[in-house]
Image (tube, grey):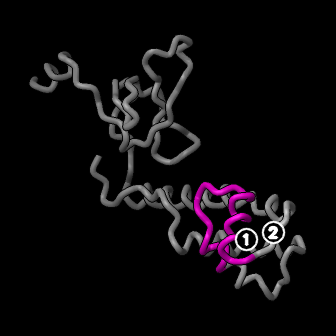
Amino acid sequence: MSEKEPRPKTLTLEMLARISGKLAASLAKSGHIEATEIDNCAADIAKVGRHHMDGYELAKALDDRCYWDCNLMMADDMDSFSSLADAEIKAAQKAWAERNGIKPPFELGTRVTTCHGETGVLDEVYAHDVAKYCVKVDGDPNKTRRSIVAFEDVVPVVTAKTAADSTL
């Protein structure tokens, strides 16, 4: 697949700033920090926050690197960091798909190999994320397992029949 730009997969500084601002405002609303501390706290959160952190990991990083004194209730309130990060990345991917006119590159029913080395058949376009397939994985005894794989992370399996069809 040759899109004009790669799929956004990581948080940018702008995304981190938005997430950190929301989280700091939430901490102020809950009474964990003063309203006058929101900007400084947001800067600290942006400095240490990483995409898949839960509240405990974020609180620990803030304690260790920014000299906060977090308690369990603060850690619980910061548990939303990861879901806020997921929402930011999903929004960026949606904008990317629209900007680049991303469409499914292969028809449903195509046999593929995924970036994880699994083989299977493209079963459907995944409706709950951006530009992804559900791949019906080979070797599943119940025939119910699906892997969710980005459009750009599948490659059609070349068989004798598909190779002969391409020469016609």
- Secondary structure, mark 1, is helix
Residue at 13% across, 19% down:
164
Report which quarter residue 5 is drawn in: bottom left
Residue 118 location (% of width, % of height): 40, 27
Q: Are marks 2 and 1 in contact (CB under 8 Å)?
A: yes
The chief SS type of the magenta part is helix
Residue at 62% across, 73% down:
46
Task: List the residue tagged with mark 1.
Answer: 63
- Secondary structure, mark 2, is loop
Identify residue type, mark 1.
Asp
Q: Residue lying farthest top? A: 141
Instruction: Report the magenta residues as a range.
Output: 43-67
Please state if 28 lies on the left or on the right of 5 as rendered. Answer: right
Please state if 20 lies on the left or on the right of 130 as rendered. Answer: right
Around disc 1, counting alpha carbons within 10 Å, would you say few (fewer than 14), some (14 to 19), or many (20 or more)?
some
Indicate whether 143 appears above or below 5: above
Indicate whether 81 appears above or below 143: below
Residue 59 location (% of width, % of height): 74, 65
Task: List the residue tagged with mark 2.
Answer: 70
Residue at 59% across, 62% down:
50
Q: Residue lying farthest bottom? A: 36
Around disc 2, counting alpha carbons within 10 Å, would you say few (fewer than 14), some (14 to 19), or many (20 or more)?
some
In the rendered structure, which disc, 2 or 1, sits on the residue that comes first in sequence?
1
Residue 92 location (% of width, % of height): 51, 61
Q: Is residue 58 magenta?
A: yes
Q: Nearer the viewer, residue 22 or 34?
A: 34
Please state if 40 lies on the left or on the right of 9 as rendered. Answer: right
Residue 39 location (% of width, % of height): 71, 84
Residue at 48% across, 36% down:
125
Q: Nearer the viewer, residue 164 or 113?
A: 113
